Image: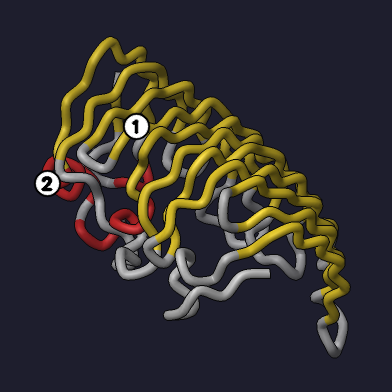
Amino acid sequence: SIRGLPDVKRFYADLDIDQLSITATDIRGLVGAGAIPTSIQLPESMNLHGSFKGSLQNFSTNTRLQSSFGAATVNGTFKNLTSKGRESYNAKIATTNFQLGRLLKKEDKLGHVTMQIDVNGSGTDPKTANGTVKGNIDEFHYNGYPYHNLVIDGKAENGTIDVDANMVDPNATFDLVAHATLNGSYPSLDMTMQMDSINLQPLNFYEKDLRF
């Protein structure tokens, strides 16, 4: 069932979706052009399967998306999404060859990404957010190069951010431990990186062969 439309503030849905085909034009017609940020480009075609219950501000979902940008699954609960500083989220997110650069209108730098990420926390401002993120990024394209095998484990707590990460890629292999403090008068960053190997030419950071 769906109620409240076309007033997106009153929108509420309780849906079990066997299969739903929808276009970007359909979505803009339902929610209004102003409801979609100008920094976002929607896929032209989308097929949905799963469930959705709630409003656009508070909802739970377990949904698989197959689109003209690639595939994604989201299984989680999201609350207070329109209340800055009060947002909360607990979700498992996976993508397969999803064209993130097209979604964010950053195609000059970002390409497609295949990943599995768990996020749990509150807030979206790095200075005040609290939460954790853990996951594996099997492949992501940046600056025209496909990076592989990035593992990340991060934690944010009121402006303090800790990150452990490692990557095993043919042209960039490293281990990273970072600690950042963002809520003081002068933000600080302490970082230790063990770089086993890096080749800047295939990463498109240097024209000539340059490796360490």
Rate crowding at label 2 as few (under 14), some (14 to 19) or many (20 or more) other CA atoms within 10 Å: few
The mark found on residue 176 in the picture is none
Residue drawn 17% across the image and 25% down it: 21
Residue in front for this viewpoint, 172 or 164: 172
Image position of 176 (left or right of 65)? right
Residue in front for this viewpoint, 18 or 196: 196
Residue 28 at least partly seen: yes
Residue in front for this viewpoint, 207 or 56: 207
Image position of 177 (left or right of 196)? right
Which amino acid does the dot numbered 1 rest on? Answer: Ala
Rate crowding at label 1 as few (under 14), some (14 to 19) or many (20 or more) other CA atoms within 10 Å: some
On screen, residue 33 above or below 159: above
Residue named by callout 2: 25
Image position of 110 (left or right of 191)? left
Query: How many numbered circles does the render carry?
Result: 2
Quarter of the image where the C terminus is located = bottom right
Residue drawn 58% across the image and 47% down it: 80
